[in-house]
Image (cartoon, grey):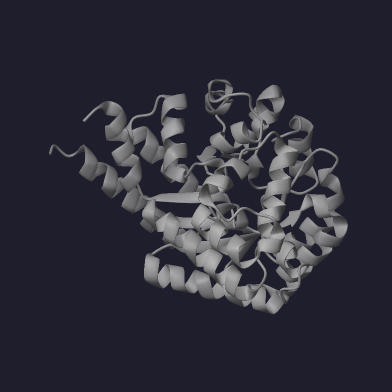
């Protein structure tokens, strides 16, 4: 077995946590095709080959357009439950034990799914996934920035007044250009006041100033993407000193043209600066990837062996919002897996 295939096998069985992955963006081609056939008026191809072409993005704006078309396929609570449970099934196949799934309630509620039915669907899927698949899911409810302050108000209302059991954090997604972070401060303040964590996207398609805004106005505890942080040495130092992690999604950054190529990806520069990083898949089927693939990319970009990959997996667990006992169990599982792998065969 070559070193490369050996590492691929190691990654496949490595117990992992994922902190930056989107609900609708995790819809596999099989699920999307099924939903597209049920809802042909949405204009999303139902043929898997046509879907692959449909998911080839020219830029970030085009990605958002396609993403919202897939959002429009989620028409009722049964669609929501099916999608959520099937995502967990895909995660189980990758040895993902814990995931903080970014959910955008506004996208579904504004299209007519009652908020209570939406929450009941994801919660039922969450409980079933943990019981039947061994995958623990928690929710990040995010504001779709492109939908404006109305969406922020509705997201904050659902998050702070309806408080589903699995909800742990509050985020902000969508385009960054023309969507300043500070305007969302009142909504993040409300979320933090009820004990939710702050995890906005920032610095993916804009510069370091957006990351500063997320830190100062939104009190970010982790930054989604943060690829432009490397342009500001003072920011890198701040992130490193305060142990504020970046949720890095390499393939996503290439697919949306946020980064020119994997060879130019700033991941190694972030790590060299002492910044805590986690590896994530973002919208995996849309980008033709999964978390195992992203770990393989990280291994190549950072020159990691099996112990290095296990350390990367522990990073994600340690900076997650999983409870202390859950973190200890998962870190122990990672350590046991590594020890078994290193034991002479």
Q: Residue at point 65% right, 47% down?
A: 221
Is residue 42 something that shows in the picture?
yes
Whether residue 196 is situated above or below residue 122 in the rendered picture: above
Q: Position of residue 248 (x, y in %)?
A: 57, 38
Whether residue 30 is situated above or below residue 285 in the rendered picture: below
Quadrant location of residue 212? top right
Q: Residue at point 59% right, 25% down?
A: 266
Q: Position of residue 157 (x, y in %)?
A: 78, 69
Q: Position of residue 47 (x, y in %)?
A: 54, 52
Q: Position of residue 181 (x, y in %)?
A: 81, 45
Q: Report the side of 220 relative to 273 (left or right).
A: right
Quadrant location of residue 100? bottom right
Is residue 200 something that shows in the picture?
no
Q: Quadrant location of the C terminus? A: top left
Q: Report the side of 168 relative to 335 (left or right).
A: right
Viewer-nearest residue: 313 or 281: 281
Whether residue 128 is situated above or below residue 89 in the rendered picture: below
Q: Quadrant location of the N terminus? A: top left
Q: Residue at point 58% right, 56% down?
A: 46
Q: Residue at point 51% right, 41% down?
A: 288
Viewer-nearest residue: 162 or 218: 162
Q: Residue furthest left?
A: 345
Viewer-nearest residue: 62 or 126: 62
């Amino acid at each position: 077995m070559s070193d490369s295939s050996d590492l691929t096998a190691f990654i496949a069985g490595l117990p992992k946590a994922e902190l930056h992955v989107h609900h609708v963006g995790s819809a596999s081609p099989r699920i999307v095709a099924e939903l597209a056939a049920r809802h042909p008026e949405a204009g999303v191809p139902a043929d898997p080959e046509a879907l692959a072409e449909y998911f080839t993005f020219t830029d970030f704006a085009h990605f958002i357009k396609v993403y919202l078309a897939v959002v429009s396929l989620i028409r009722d609570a049964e669609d929501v439950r099916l999608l959520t449970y099937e995502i967990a099934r895909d995660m189980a196949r990758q040895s993902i034990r814990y995931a903080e799934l970014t959910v955008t309630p506004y996208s579904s509620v504004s299209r007519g799914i009652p908020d209570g039915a939406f929450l009941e669907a994801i919660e039922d899927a969450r409980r079933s996934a943990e019981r039947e698949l061994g995958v623990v899911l928690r929710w990040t409810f995010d504001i779709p920035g492109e939908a404006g302050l109305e969406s922020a108000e509705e997201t904050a209302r659902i998050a702070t007044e309806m408080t589903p059991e699995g909800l742990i954090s509050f985020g902000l997604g969508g385009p960054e250009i023309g969507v300043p972070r500070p305007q969302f401060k009142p909504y993040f303040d409300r979320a933090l006041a009820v004990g939710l964590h702050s995890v906005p996207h920032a610095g993916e398609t804009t510069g370091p100033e957006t990351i500063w805004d997320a830190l100062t106005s939104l009190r970010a505890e982790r930054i989604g993407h943060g690829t432009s942080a490397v342009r500001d040495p003072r920011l890198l130092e701040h992130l490193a000193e305060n142990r504020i992690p970046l949720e890095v999604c390499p393939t996503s950054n290439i697919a949306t043209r946020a980064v020119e190529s994997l060879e130019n990806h700033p991941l190694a520069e972030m790590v060299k600066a002492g910044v805590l990083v986690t590896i994530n898949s973002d919208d995996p089927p849309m980008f033709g990837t999964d978390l195992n693939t992203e770990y393989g990319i990280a291994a190549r970009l950072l020159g990691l062996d099996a112990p290095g990959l296990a350390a990367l997996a522990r990073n994600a667990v340690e900076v997650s919002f999983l409870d202390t006992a859950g973190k200890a169990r998962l870190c122990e599982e990672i350590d046991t897996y590594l020890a078994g792998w290193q034991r002479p065969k």
